[in-house]
Image (cartoon, rainbow, N blue to C red):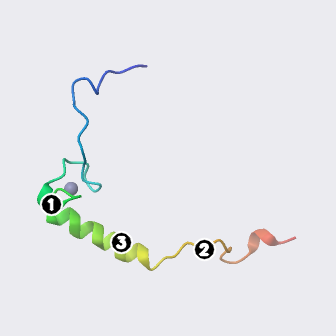
């Protein structure tokens, strides 16, 4: 059950949220301009969708 992994590998200070590779200071918090661009894409796409507490159609409130 207990695997010793952290002993061999030092925990990285920060990793790219996109590909989990070590962060490059020049592209923090990413490892490359590619990942940075990809993140921007996601952010833009996700930005349009604002999660609301209201039900989309109110089907659950069919009391
Ligand atoms: Zn990356």
Query: What quarter of the picture does the C terminus occupy?
Result: bottom right
Q: In which quarter of the image is residue 3?
A: top left
Residue at the (52%, 76%) spot, across then down: 50
Residue at the disc numbered 1: 32
**Along the line of sight, which residue is nearer the eye, 50 or 10?**
10
Q: Label 2 vs label 1: CA separation?
A: 33 Å
Tell whether 47 sits left or right of 5. right
Q: Where is residue 42 in the image (x, y as percent from the top left)?
A: 34, 70
Q: Residues within 10 Å of mark 3 (few under 14, many from 20)?
A: few
**Secondary structure under the numbered disc 2 in the rendered image:** loop
Q: Position of residue 18 (x, y in %)?
A: 28, 56
Residue at the disc numbered 2: 52
How many numbered circles are shown? Answer: 3
**Secondary structure under the numbered disc 1 in the rendered image:** loop
Q: Which of marks 3 and 2 is nearer the N terminus?
A: 3
Residue at the disc numbered 3: 43
Some atom of ligand 1 lies within 8 Å of the CB belonging to the residue at label 1: yes
**Along the line of sight, which residue is nearer the eye, 3 or 29?**
29
Q: Do the CB atoms of the residues marked 1 and 3 lie less than 8 Å apart? A: no
Q: Label 1 vs label 3: CA separation?
A: 17 Å
Instruction: Check the image and report above or below for 47 versus 60.
Output: below
Q: Earlier in the sequence, mark 2 or mark 1?
A: 1
On residue 19, the disc is none
Q: In which quarter of the image is residue 29?
A: bottom left
């Amino acid at each position: 059950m207990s695997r010793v992994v952290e002993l061999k590998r030092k925990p990285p200070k920060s990793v790219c949220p996109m590909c989990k590779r070590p962060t490059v200071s020049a592209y923090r918090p990413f490892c490359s301009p590619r990942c940075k661009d990809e993140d921007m894409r996601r952010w833009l796409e996700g930005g349009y969708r604002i999660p609301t507490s209201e039900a989309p159609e109110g089907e659950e409130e069919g009391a």
